[in-house]
Image (cartoon, grey):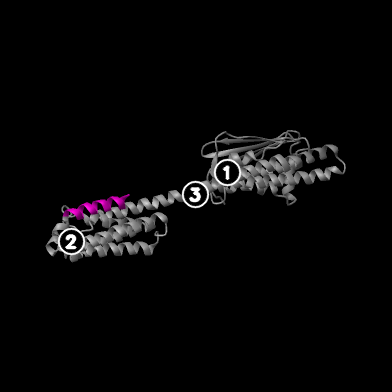
């Protein structure tokens, strides 16, 4: 649109000054070349094949040539008293093209080239900005359009990335539902019925239970935030832990925390739920509660199983089995959080895991 309007203005200006030129016929021929080049550039940029550095350099060269051609069609005095016949407005198209293609610096450099061609035509550089603001206009246009172009490209890239992410999350959600409604439910049924039947089927039940937990972890890992994202919705991640034996209560709104924190917190919760599955008893149920405390989040993992006898954890550490110490407590401490355990024989087990939204590495 700017190119079209600048051509209209250039035509009006040329129509008004043509009779004052020394070679009006040659001026009209040059103006026809201006219109033809403008049309070619419009098509090239709209179709995309002109959005190349070489094409923009060619446009700058054509603009400079037409500006300097004022010496051919007009007297020296006319050139001193007026702008070049193509008009400064039309010449600014080259500045805009360079700014859009390569940013504000390139736009301002193209503007300086146009100013230099105008100065060469007149034989001097005008420093009277009150009477001749060409240099200010060219630099301002190059800077403003260049910055707008960069912003538009970033916005377009973010929009494309958001569209890809949305499509990816929708596909993951669909696959998660299929897996949950199919394979996970079947494995959970096999595990539960196998424990009820007992005997030789108990081993099959244990294998089915292991595969169910592994599949749930796989679904949870691919659920919320792709790699590289700064934050993850820990509430959505925990919802994937729900099953026939695990009840999950989380806020309705997303609970966003640093992705590293979310991954470590999810791993600790998974370990606690695995311990419930392995040690709390065949009929034990687990309850997961997420609380958003502002600067931190707390996840409680409670079960109604047999509990942990006094001294059993210390005994496990003495035997070299440090799963709880490293997988749960160690993870929380590494993030600047803490893990509290409440348990006793016949009283079930409850882990209270608290972490800051952003990791605080401790030694």
Report crowding for label 3: few under 14, some 14 to 19, many 20 or more residues within 10 A (C-alpha): few
User: Residue drawn 83% across and 45% down?
Assistant: 203
Q: Residue at x 29, y 63 (%)?
A: 62
Q: Position of residue 93 (x, y in %)?
A: 30, 56
Q: Is residue 4 left or right of residue 176?
A: left
Residue matched to label 3: 160
In this view, the residue in front, 330 or 249, is 249
Does residue 7 belong to the magenta stretch?
yes
At label 1, counting other C-alpha atoms closer than 10 Å, the crowd grade (few under 14, some 14-19, many 20 or more) is: many
- The residue that label 2 is drawn on is 24
User: Disc 1 marks which residue?
Assistant: 337
Q: Nearer the viewer, residue 37 or 341?
A: 37
Report helix, strand or loop for mark 2.
helix
Q: Are marks 1 and 3 in contact (CB under 8 Å)?
A: no
60 drawn magenta = no
Q: Earlier in the sequence, mark 2 or mark 1?
A: 2
Percent x, y for residue 119?
20, 63
Q: Nearer the viewer, residue 318 or 336?
A: 336
> From this viewpoint, is residue 78 visible?
yes
The residue located at (76%, 41%) in the rendering is: 186
C-alpha gap between disc 3 and disc 2: 52 Å
Mark 1 lies on a secondary structure that is: loop
Q: CA distance from mark 2 to mark 1?
A: 83 Å
Give the x, y percent position of residue 292: 55, 36
Give, as a single range, the part of the protein colored magenta: 1-16
Say whether residue 130 is left or right of residue 113. Answer: left
Q: Residue 172's mark?
A: none
Q: Is residue 166 above or below residue 91?
A: above
Where residue 298 sits in the image (x, y, percent)? 59, 38
Figure quadrant of residue 111 = bottom left
Residue 261 visible somewhere in the drawing: no
Q: Is residue 172 above or below residue 60?
A: above
């Amino acid at each position: 649109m700017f190119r079209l309007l600048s051509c209209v203005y250039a035509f009006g200006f040329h129509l008004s000054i043509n009779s004052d030129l020394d070679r009006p016929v040659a001026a009209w021929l040059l103006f026809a070349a201006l219109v033809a080049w403008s049309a070619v550039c419009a098509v090239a940029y709209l179709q995309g094949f002109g959005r190349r550095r070489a094409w923009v350099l060619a446009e700058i060269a054509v603009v400079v040539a037409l500006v300097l051609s004022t010496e051919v069609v007009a007297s020296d005095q006319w050139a001193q008293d007026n702008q070049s016949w193509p008009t400064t407005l039309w010449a600014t198209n080259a500045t805009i093209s360079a700014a859009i293609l390569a940013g504000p610096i390139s736009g301002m450099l193209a503007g300086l080239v146009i100013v230099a061609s105008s100065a060469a035509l007149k034989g001097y550089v005008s420093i009277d900005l009150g009477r001749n603001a060409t240099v200010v206009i060219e630099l301002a246009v190059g800077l403003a359009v260049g910055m707008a172009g960069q912003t538009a490209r970033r916005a377009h890239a973010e929009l494309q990335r958001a569209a890809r992410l949305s499509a990816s999350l929708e596909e993951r959600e669909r696959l998660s539902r299929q897996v949950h409604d199919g394979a996970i439910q079947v494995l959970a049924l096999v595990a539960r019925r196998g424990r009820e039947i007992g005997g030789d089927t108990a081993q099959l039940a244990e294998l089915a239970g292991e595969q169910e937990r592994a599949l749930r972890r796989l679904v949870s890992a691919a659920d919320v935030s792709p790699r590289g994202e700064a934050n993850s919705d820990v509430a959505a991640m925990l919802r994937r832990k729900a099953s026939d034996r695990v009840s999950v209560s989380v806020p309705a709104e997303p609970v966003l925390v640093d992705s590293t924190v979310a991954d470590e917190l999810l791993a600790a919760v998974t370990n606690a739920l695995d311990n419930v599955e392995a040690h709390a008893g065949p009929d034990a149920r687990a309850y997961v509660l997420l609380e958003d405390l502002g600067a931190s989040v707390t996840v409680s993992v409670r079960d109604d199983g047999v509990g942990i006898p006094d001294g059993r954890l210390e005994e496990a550490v003495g035997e070299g089995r440090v799963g709880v110490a490293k997988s749960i407590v160690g993870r929380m401490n590494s993030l600047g959080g803490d893990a509290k355990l409440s348990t006793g024989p016949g009283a079930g087990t409850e882990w209270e895991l608290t972490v800051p939204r952003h990791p605080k590495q401790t030694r």
